[in-house]
Amino acid sequence: MMVTADPEICKQICVKQFTSFYNRRAIPLTNKELLTGLNMLKDQKWKNKRNALTPAFSTSKMKAMTPLVNTAADALVRNLKKHCESVKPMQCRDVFGSYGIDSLASAGFGVDVNSQENPDNPFVRYAKKVFSFGPIFIVIFFFPFLIPFFAFFDITLHSKRLMKYFVDLVDETVALRKSQDPSVKRVDLLQQMMDAHDVYDQYIKGNEDEEEEDENGVKLVKDGTSDTREFCKKFTNEDILGQSLVFFLGGLETTSTTMSFLAYVMATHPDIQDKMCKEIDDVMAEYDEPNYQAVAKMLYLDMVVRETLRMYPPAVRFERECNEDVTIAGARIPKGMYISVAANAIHHNPDIYPEPEKFIPERFTKEEKQKRHPYSWLPFGAGPRNCIAMRFALLDLKIGFVRIFTKYTFEPCAETEIPPKLGTSRFLAPEEITLAVKRRR
């Protein structure tokens, strides 16, 4: 493996010479249900499915998904009201984790679980077990030579009972959708995958509004070959299950941790919190509830979110596999080598971000961003294999906080740890963040 914290090398690997670094690292002992997910696919299979799914996260689809997110945010606001009235400190990861389950289950699986008010829902119970790998993960991390042994006995990272629950859920939901009036469709990821061939046919006609760009305005993968068309028409239940699970797994932990960190920095920076609340008030004076257009006008909120993701990127690094001998920046990289981009190191490089441990949203004004290398902010990866759900992730947490800060604010309390202690999961996450919820004056 080669590890880099150079934005230019990141650009070369993820964009300029992307064809030499097409794939991600395979995760050993992955359940077969997850093997059809975008993060696990390689080469042309990945490209085909990425093309088929990209339109599901276009601007028009994000606008249509906003009501699903607002429904989850309704329960979030009711939950905060209880903490405020009872003067009971809020455990951020629990509260925001439930919000993440609700919004992701609704947008990804097409089911309404309301985990914030119905914690005994079977979906909630199984969702909370998703990251409980048990000792198997630790064993294969330290003793990788045991992987073939576990594979021989069909031992996987996630329990088969957990996977069966989600398999049955997707099968039942798809069957129900097919039996309903086709003129009445719910706009969510599940429906987009069921309609993948129709969506893709529209996409390849060149509708600019439906094209995807990465964070730096680079047009991502687009291919209209007959082979790709045929592949998209064969989006099976296994494909739908794999993408739904990856969408849910990739978003659940990152949503709860990012929202927890953002609430923490607002509580510890009341001046920034006040400035953001004022912007929300000014914009929301024109709208009944936050939607895609309203959130797009909140420039300071966007700066706050980006600075939070700079300081606390959920994925501290990401990897690409070299598929042919190549030379970058004078370094020879042989076929089969993995390149690890240390996003967290780039985010805390004082030459790129002066005083990196300070929370300064103004780093992300248009003028300041133009002064930096375009690949110096990497919470969602970069290039064609960046996080396909980046738009949804940002919309999800922004709508959640707009709804919160319309009525409430956060303050430190006796239980608040400053700075927060970080946990030991595979993501950059706090052990816990405890804050007081106050009604806005």
Image: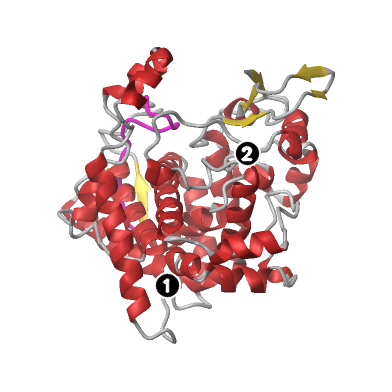
Question: Looking at this view, is 393 or 149 the one in front?
Answer: 149
Q: Quadrant of the C terminus?
A: bottom left
Tell me the kind of residue under disc 2: Leu
Secondary structure category for the residue under label 1? helix
Q: Residue at x 36, y 66 (%)?
A: 110
Q: Which mark is residue 67?
A: 1
Q: Between residue 267 and residue 121, name the one nearer to us.
A: 121
Please provide percent x and percent y for residue 206.
75, 70
Q: Residue at x 48, y 47 (%)?
A: 37
Which residue is label 2 attached to? 378
Q: Please, is residue 129 above or below residue 228 in the view?
A: above
Q: Quadrant of residue 370?
A: top right
Indicate whether residue 433 is drawn in magenta. yes
Mark 2 or mark 1, earlier in chain: 1
Q: Which residues are magenta?
A: 424-439
Quarter-of-image position of residue 41: top right
Residue visible at 71% across and 23% down in the picture: 335
Residue 440 visible (yes or no): no
Q: Is residue 190 visible?
A: yes
Identify residue type, mark 1. Answer: Pro
Q: Are there few (<14), some (14-19), or many (20+) residues within 10 Å of tag 2?
A: many
